[in-house]
Amino acid sequence: MSSVTLSEVTQMSLKDLPMDNWMAHLPDALWDIPLSNLSIPGSHNAITYCLDKNDHSPVDLTQPDMLKKLDKYMKPLIRPFVYKWAITQESSVREQLDCGVRYCDLRIAHRPNDSSSDLYFYHGVYTTITVETVLKEITAWLDVHPKEIVVLSFSHFLGLSQDLHALLISTIKSVFNSRLCPKMELVTLRNLWSLGYQVIVSYEHNVANCHRELWFHIPYWWANKCKAEELIEEFEHRKQLGRPGGFFVTGINLTEDLKYICSHPTESLKDMVMSTYPTLLDWVRKQKPGPNTGSLNIIAGDFVSESQFIPTVIALNENLLGRSTR
């Protein structure tokens, strides 16, 4: 594990901190700033590195009827396209955390016609790995990173009954136990460290009202654009209207449409994302965290471990130290 002294931290750019322990190595001037005013790197659709490639696995129920029919009758032709545009991360959740991700976008589903109570993730198709398995991987990672804080956003529940919601919430509480941070006003690194909290769970369902351990849904700014310039224009407009209070996410994830896919038949989502990262990161470098109008908080993207996205987002916290980012 990397070790950095306090004097070294005051001299170095925050982008050079050890990514697996970057929160633990932040300057103490940032320890009392609310986490909702820090710049935090996040992973959009974090669990898509393990999509089920079994021919018997259906596409998820949110997909258009036409795609479902084509997939049913022309699976060998259609399914490769689905995978190319459904995978948003290629690194495991543990690898993402090691790279510095501290916010995970988790989309939960129960497979249709599944008699078990197992829950999975989904994006186009369902994952092979269960929700409980991923949560246990996260808590095992936290065991050896006691000063790192993760924000987990559970949303887009597909096919979950009230009983399955109850089971999921029970699993969350059981796996994270005393690490779960209840709803509270003061959420700073210093305060969370002193109380032993490491996990903030937001839950996009009204059942969150009944559980003090579940935070309300964290707003996610989604531009729904396939071009970097249009995404940036959309977010600049939203910034003028003011940031939400508390945690919120700016998703620099691009969204392909049918026209784009048809005009780029040999490409994939990764090709589109990686070709636009230089433009997107140039924009990210100009952003500032904090409470002011136009400030950003969590910034999430695709294929986050394969570019300078994460250190770039972390370095924005230098603005809170009176430094300009480099």
Image: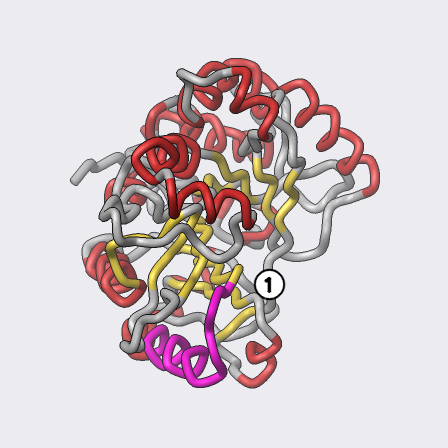
Q: Is residue 230 visible?
A: yes
**Left or right: 178 in relation to 293:** left
Task: Give the quadrant of residue 11.
Answer: top left
Please, is residue 307 above or below residue 255 in the view? Answer: above
Answer few, some or many: residues within 10 Å of disc 1's Cα (few below 14, many 20 plus, some between 14 and 19): some
Q: What stretch is highlighted in magenta?
A: 157-173
**Left or right: 95 in relation to 148:** left
The foreground one among 177 and 30 is 177
- State the residue at coordinates (28%, 34%): 18
The foreground one among 66 and 137 is 66
- State the residue at coordinates (36%, 54%): 58
Residue with the mark numbered 1: 217
Q: Position of residue 210 (x, y in %)?
A: 56, 85
Image quarter of the N terminus: top left
Task: Give the quadrant of residue 26.
Answer: top left
- State the residue at coordinates (35%, 31%): 77
Please, is residue 254 above or below residue 266 in the view? Answer: below
Q: Where is residue 38 in the image (x, y as percent from the top left)?
A: 55, 44
Q: Position of residue 223 (x, y in %)?
A: 67, 36
- State the residue at coordinates (50%, 45%): 30
Q: Is residue 151 visible?
A: no
Q: Which amino acid does label 1 sit on?
A: His
Whether residue 169 is in magenta: the answer is: yes
**Left or right: 20 in relation to 222:** left
